Amino acid sequence: MNREAARAAIRDFLIALGHDPERNPELVETPARVVEAFADELLAGYGRDLPALVTKDSSPAPPNPGLIALRDVAVATVCPHHLMPALGRANVIYRPGDRILGIGVVARFVDDCARRLVLQETIGQDVVATLVKHAGARGALCEITLRHGCLSARGAHQVDARVTTVARAGEITESEVLIALGRTSTSVATVEKP
Ligand SMILES: [Zn+2]
């Protein structure tokens, strides 16, 4: 990564749009701030080693571990078409194989998969692939719901619209997903008191 070239490019971009950082004191540090935000945060998922992260923090699964769901994981990504942020939440469900992952690790690699120049649907596919291929999960699902800057601040100006994508692989059924996400009650009979 060439930060100096990136800073120069942002400065040139501003000048080309008619905003000279030399004349507007608010813009003097903007090229440095923008490059720092993209390099160190918005695109920080590059260079992180997902397989190593997954294998480092896991423990043997008990017999018949059932499903594990991690809900409302924060997601911050950058749309590759407009370079604008998209923010929201992910729900991750998996059926462990031989190993169970640390909960923090799941949240961490969702973050790693998101902080790249990727489409929202790709983030979910990468999360599911990481769980199945590297963590040995027998099934996995990742549902992501985001508000996109490029859908609200520009374009269709849909400030309240949210985009949901679902990626799924392996042994995991529709009804298990609904229960794991708390969206339906099981049909347990209730007995009224006399
Ligand atoms: Zn976009």
Image (tube, grey):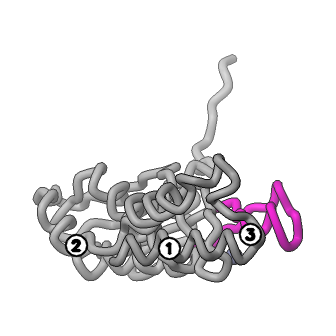
Position of the C terminus by quadrant: top right
Please name the amino acid that badge 3 sits on.
Cys
Please name the amino acid that badge 1 sits on.
Ala
Asked which secondary structure carries label 1, the reply is helix
Position of the N terminus by quadrant: bottom left
The residue indicated by pointer 3 is: 150
* C-alpha gap between disc 3 and disc 1: 25 Å
Category of crowding for the residue at label 3, using alpha-carbon neighbours closer than 10 angstroms: few (below 14), some (14–19), many (at least 20): many
Relative depth, front residue between 41 and 73: 41
Residue 65 seen from this side: yes
Q: Are marks 3 and 2 in contact (CB under 8 Å)?
A: no
Q: Residue at x 30, y 78 (%)?
A: 132
Please tell me whether residue 49 belongs to the stretch shown in magenta: no
* C-alpha gap between disc 3 and disc 2: 29 Å
Q: Quadrant of residue 100?
A: bottom left
Q: Earlier in the sequence, mark 1 or mark 2?
A: 1
The residue lying furthest to the top in this view is 194
Q: Report whether 65 appears left or right of 68.
A: left
Relative depth, front residue between 181 and 72: 72
User: In front: mark 1 or mark 2?
Assistant: 1
Magenta range? 146-167
Category of crowding for the residue at label 1, using alpha-carbon neighbours closer than 10 angstroms: few (below 14), some (14–19), many (at least 20): some
Asked which secondary structure carries label 3, the reply is helix
The residue indicated by pointer 2 is: 49
Identify whether 47 is placed above or below 69. below
The residue indicated by pointer 1 is: 8
- x, y percent for residue 23: 69, 56
Q: Report whether 58 appears left or right of 147.
A: left
- x, y percent for residue 168: 48, 78
Which quarter is ligand 1 in?
bottom right
